Amino acid sequence: MRGYAMLKIGETGWIEKPVPVCGPMDAILKPTILAPCTTDVKTVWKGALGERHNMILGHECCAEVVEVGSLVKDFKPGDQVVVPAVTPNWSSLEAQGGASSHSGGMLNAWKYSNTEDGMFSEYFACSDADGNLAPIPAGVAPEEAVMLSDMIPPGFQSVELADVQFGDTVLVIGIGPVGLMAVAASLLRGAARVIVVGSRPASLAAAKAYGATEFINYKDGPIEDSVLKLTGGKGVDRVCVCGGDGETFAAAVRSLKPGGKIGSVISMDLHDTVKVPSTEWGFGMGDKQIVGGAMIGGRLRLEKLGALLSSGRLDVKPLITHRFHGWDGLEESIFLGRSKPADLIKSVVTL
């Protein structure tokens, strides 16, 4: 089979590999719609995960089931499914302990284009299929359903990690598709104000449509200065870090009230370091919490978030700004994510 791979840091191309073998709890799938991710770009051109050779990229797709293992009960060939970016081993001790994203070790449930070949190929495998695959939600278009793979879940998780409560003032740093989902989730959780940090016009317009109340352009000066001005020097109750790097956490801590929480879902680079300013952290005693989490995968999570789509409570159409068709469009879509034009939020590739 053919797949689009990271050949080495800084280089991509098409390669040939054998079709995966289906284990007893696995499914073999054929992608029907793909969504290249900023993480693919960082993996290849920033070496964010370290060196990878001939590793097929991609961790966001909807797919058709081609084959299932002898122990798979809930899916059959021909089923149309969403495949999450994170596919835990649900019988692992880590999953039983509530850390399913780390089943088998730190971040090991993030297999696609990390420890195993990804989805940008004619066929790929999903382990623990009954626990990880989810049917495309009723009445939801596949290009919208693919946002369940790895855009909606981390955005919502940042809000959960920050523990947004009724009436809170929330700061969302980074308003790509994940940050936009954090804006939507904050309002669903009862936030009174949502301040967003970004600079690209398309994202700012989408953030406003999702209910953001105030806007900060990080190019205009330190984020925390603008936040403190908007809040009368008090700071915000919660911060969702959905973009940036290790330096971003200093601004987040400085923007946060004592007793507040920071929920981070960003994927930092291999050699990045989180910066925590001592004074604004109360010299370690400011009761300001920083919690970083890997995306929660699995069928239950996808079905619950998918119910928001099928019920009309969540609309992801504003995320999709660019559409491509066929395998020839995949590389163009990936390089679009690398150049990141001002009108880009998220691209999808229909096969």
Image: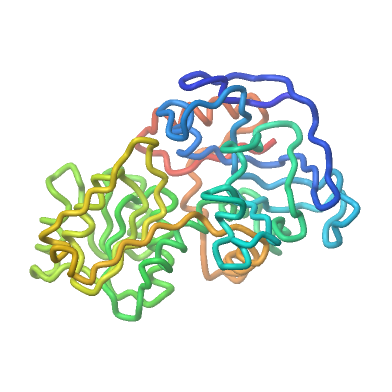
**Residue drawn 46% across and 30% down?**
50
**Residue drawn 68% across and 26% down?**
3
**Residue drawn 54% across and 37% down?**
36
**Residue drawn 23% across and 62% down?**
214
Q: Residue farthest to the right?
A: 70
The correct choice, above or below, for 209 with respect to 63 in the image is below
Quadrant assignment, res 7 = top right
Q: Pinpoint residue 119: horizontal percent, then vertical percent.
A: 66, 37
Q: Is residue 158 left or right of residue 286?
A: right
Q: Pinpoint residue 106: horizontal percent, then vertical percent.
A: 52, 50
The correct choice, above or below, for 41 with respect to 319 in the image is above
- Colour setup of the view: rainbow
Q: Is residue 87 left or right of residue 24?
A: left
Q: Is residue 223 left or right of residue 305?
A: left
Question: 58 or 322: nearer the eye?
Answer: 58
* Quadrant showing the N terminus: top right
